[in-house]
Image: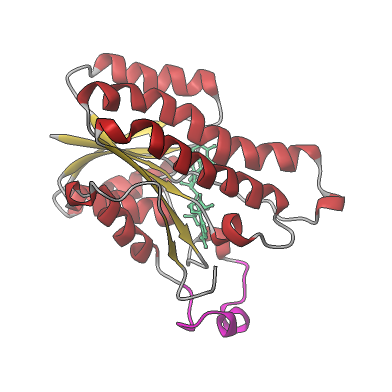
Amino acid sequence: MKYALVTGGSRGIGRAVCIKLAGMGYHVLVNFKGNITEAEKTLSAINERGGEGSLLQFDVSNRQQVQEVLGGWLENNADKFIEVLVNNAGIKDDVLLMWMKDEQWDNVINTSLNGFYIVTKLVLQNMLMQKYGRIINIVSLSGLKGLPGQTNYAAAKGGVIAATKALAQEVGRRNITVNAIAPGFIKTDMTEGLDEKQLRSLIPVSRFGEPEEVAHAVGFFASAESAYITGEVLSVNGGMYS
Ligand code: NDP
């Protein structure tokens, strides 16, 4: 069986990605930070559709935890190969820079940017040995154009975009592709407080996107046929200029 790891798979975009990859025949390792109830719902959704998955709880920004839990899984499952990694875990904590607290900067950078580094470094080893892999990073419109109140989030996502392009060049010869997806406004817990009616005038398609619409793009990059596409950033934002 083929294996895929989705960070932040308990809710929102991550859940839709887990369901998509399970539908493509992957045993999906559903990572989450703390919300076990929601993580179990993702697993049930996978199982109800005839797919396979397991839960893997760790904080992507915590080196020790990632090493213990993910590193432990890799050690105990040396015969299994994670060929798709989706770095999706992310948080936002919006505030103007002049009011930003150090921990607001640190938490957002640690989750998206350091989380990408910590998890990818571990999973990449086997991809290099197997000479195959698909790494897909969920970034954001904010990481492409910047949005006021999001200097921390834009820096984290912009950093992952640059890392996507650099890593793609490092590992291309090993048949490993590294791509990013930049969603706009997607209906999840993260955008719950936003007023869709007010914001939709900014979106040519005139609505927020569904998590499944991002998952569709993940499925595209994850497929074996996408072997000649790497270092790309695909916007999934209803036509907003980016
Ligand atoms: P949600 O807030 O709905 O879900 C966040 C997910 O990330 C949860 O599964 C959560 O786990 C997990 N998570 C958070 N911190 C960590 C951590 N330190 N370690 C492991 N898992 C963690 O977010 P969305 O689905 O909206 O967003 C998913 C990704 O898409 C994020 O990277 C986000 O920045 C990006 N994005 C979202 C947009 C949107 O409009 N929604 C737009 C652009 C980008 P738990 O349930 O345990 O807390």
Name the residue nearer the viewer: 232 or 107.
Answer: 232
Q: Position of residue 9 (x, y in %)?
A: 39, 45
Q: Residue furthest top?
A: 75
Q: How is the image coloured?
A: secondary structure
The structure residue drawn at horizontal position 17% and vertical position 55%, both measured from the top left corner, is 49
> Magenta residues, as a range?
193-208
Q: Position of residue 188 (x, y in %)?
A: 49, 62
Q: Is residue 134 visible?
A: no
**Is residue 212 magenta-colored?**
no
Name the residue nearer the viewer: 228 or 33.
Answer: 228
**183 over 171 or under it: above or below:** below
The structure residue drawn at horizontal position 68% and vertical position 51%, both measured from the top left corner, is 93
**206 over 218 or under it: above or below:** below
Where residue 150 sits, quadrant-wise, is bottom right
The structure residue drawn at horizontal position 33% and vertical position 35%, both measured from the top left corner, is 55
On the picture, is 229 further left or further right than 201? left
**217 over 86 or under it: above or below:** below
Q: Position of residue 212 (x, y in %)?
A: 34, 63
Name the residue nearer the viewer: 203 or 62.
Answer: 203
**Is residue 195 magenta-colored?**
yes
Q: Position of residue 21 (x, y in %)?
A: 24, 49
Number of marks drawn? 0
Where residue 71 sits, quadrant-wise, is top left
Q: Is residue 230 visible?
A: yes
On the picture, is 199 further left or further right than 96? left
The quadrant of the picture occupied by the N terminus is top left
The quadrant of the picture occupied by the C terminus is bottom right
